[in-house]
């Protein structure tokens, strides 16, 4: 191993030279995208996603709608921005949340049923569904020791993906893509993801932070949110508000259309006919990317950096810091105010609106009112500054990532677990979309790419 590491060290200068050659050889003239009318990244010039498929699972709306579901346009032919809507199987997310919170219930399991089966469950159906998930809420014998504890990854998402791929080996029928078998696999993974995520984190703390290794078994009578908090904490204790807010976060992260990066990956891999474990591991890889699932970590780090540079937290100071971010003078110098704006939503992100209603309660319980107040002021000031300094084609508002990192912080969930917690919810949406792809599409997803290289002749090695 030492010999290999020495070889890598000695070879890196040459690899760096080759990497420049690789980059130069593949750089494409950006004018070609307009010349050939290429939707780069399947996005129109105005940022709207190109229509690439149909889904019946959820709807994301950021513009005014006509009764038939088409969009309204102004006199110039532009779509008219409107407060955002997120609908699970046609039902407004606000109504879903108000429903289970009003009845003082946890909602994640109910939402999982709705997304998978298309209808809200009756009390009897919900009880049976919870019993199925509870029965699947276990890992194979010695899995923690033989898989999770072996060579733990620096990043939780890699460890989670590896665990999912290992579960293939424990499945007696892993490659059967008939609907009953795929549904069974998906239900198992939905139940197992909290264990995989939390245990990976506990092992990470043990190996990399030299903390004690504490592994709590899940309690079958508890909800998904309650189990996550119980298994994460050394004493296994949590408050009712904590569990309720985490449950809300799971509900809001469970699904977000077929066009987001990780869910589109679910469709692409499913269309190839591959197994469920490979599909979910690929989706995890997509979600790990900071442009997709890691944005709330960026928000948290940005806010921590902001606090270091504010003396009295006045509006003037906050505005100056935000301007410095946009001018690439502050934080990571990339010119982005994280947690602001969305590919579809313009006036508002409905998920952020829902979170805002409940995060204040949690802040009061945790005595973090000052922290919440700072976030609220940034949420108000950032869109004004962005609109003033940037030419934008639609409105900018706080998105779900702006508040989710704050919520996880208040729950004592560390940054390493932010994206795994996201994945623990989104596995439901991925499962629904995998089933949808299997049922509706018999062809592999294969978009076209235009080759723009010039023709060249082969030159023999002696003549080069």
Image (tube, helix red, strand yellow):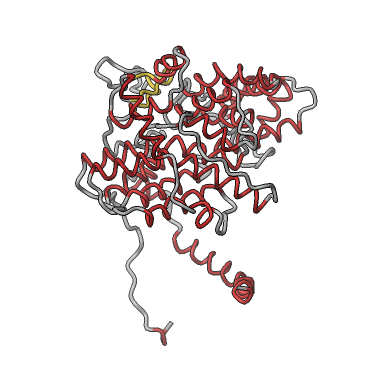
Is residue 327 found left or right of 71 in the rendered image? right
Nearest the eye: 30 or 130: 130
Q: Quadrant of the C terminus?
A: bottom left
| Quadrant in which residue 17 is drawn | bottom right
Instruction: Name the spot of residue 333 as percent of width and height, x first.
Output: 65, 42
Q: Which residue of the protein is positioned furthest toward the bottom in this rendering?
A: 462
| Lateral position of residue 386 relative to residue 439, left or right | right
The image shows residue 216, relative to residue 456, as above or below, that is: above
Rendered location of residue 100, percent (x, y): 43, 17
For image coordinates 38% across by 33% down, the residue present is 48
Q: Residue at x 37, y 31 (%)?
A: 131
Q: Position of residue 450 (x, y in %)?
A: 31, 54
Out of 388 and 95, give the one closest to the viewer.
95
**Where, quadrant-wise, is the N terminus in this rendering?**
bottom right
Give coordinates of residue 14: x percent, y percent.
58, 72
Task: From this view, report whether residue 29 is shown above or below residue 299.
Answer: below
Image height check: is 146 above or below 344? below
């Amino acid at each position: 191993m030492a010999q290999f590491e020495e070889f890598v060290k000695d070879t890196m200068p040459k690899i760096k030279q080759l990497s420049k050659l690789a980059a130069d050889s593949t750089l494409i003239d950006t004018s070609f995208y307009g010349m050939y009318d290429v939707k780069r990244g399947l996005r129109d010039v105005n940022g709207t996603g190109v229509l690439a498929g149909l889904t019946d699972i959820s709807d994301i709306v950021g513009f005014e709608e006509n009764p038939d579901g088409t969009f309204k346009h102004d006199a110039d032919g532009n779509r008219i921005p409107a407060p955002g809507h997120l609908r699970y199987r046609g039902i407004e997310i606000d109504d879903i949340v108000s429903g289970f919170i009003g009845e003082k219930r946890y909602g994640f399991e109910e939402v999982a049923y709705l997304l998978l089966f298309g209808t809200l469950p009756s009390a009897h159906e919900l009880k049976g569904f919870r019993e199925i998930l509870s029965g699947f809420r276990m890992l194979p014998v010695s899995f923690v020791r033989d898989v999770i504890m072996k060579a733990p990854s620096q990043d939780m998402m890699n460890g989670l993906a590896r665990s999912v791929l290992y579960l293939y080996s424990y499945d007696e029928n892993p490659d059967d893509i008939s609907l009953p078998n795929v549904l069974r696999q998906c239900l198992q993974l939905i139940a197992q993801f909290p264990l995989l995520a939390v245990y990976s984190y506990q092992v990470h703390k043990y190996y990399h932070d030299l903390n004690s290794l504490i592994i709590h078994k899940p309690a079958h009578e508890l909800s998904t949110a309650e189990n996550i908090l119980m298994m994460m904490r050394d004493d296994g204790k949590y408050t009712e508000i904590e569990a309720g807010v985490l449950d809300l976060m799971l509900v809001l992260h469970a699904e977000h259309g077929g066009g987001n990066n990780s869910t589109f990956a679910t469709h692409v891999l499913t269309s190839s006919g591959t197994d469920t474990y490979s599909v979910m591991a690929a989706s995890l890889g997509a979600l790990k990317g900071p442009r997709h699932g890691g944005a709330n970590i960026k928000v948290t780090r940005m806010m921590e950096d902001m606090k270091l540079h504010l003396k009295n937290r006045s509006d003037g100071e906050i505005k100056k810091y935000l301007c410095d971010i946009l001018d690439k003078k502050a934080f990571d110098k990339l010119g982005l105010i994280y947690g602001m704006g969305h590919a579809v939503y313009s006036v508002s992100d409905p998920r952020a609106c829902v979170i805002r209603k409940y995060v204040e309660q949690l802040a009061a319980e945790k005595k973090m009112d000052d922290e919440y107040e700072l976030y609220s002021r940034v949420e108000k000031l950032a869109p004004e500054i962005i609109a003033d300094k940037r030419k934008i084609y639609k409105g900018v508002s706080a998105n779900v990532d702006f508040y989710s990192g704050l919520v996880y912080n208040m729950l004592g969930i560390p940054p390493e677990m932010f994206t795994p917690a996201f994945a623990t919810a989104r596995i439901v949406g991925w499962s629904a979309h995998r089933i949808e792809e299997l049922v509706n599409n018999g062809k592999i997803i294969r978009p076209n790419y235009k080759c723009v290289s010039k023709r060249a002749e082969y030159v023999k090695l002696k003549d080069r």
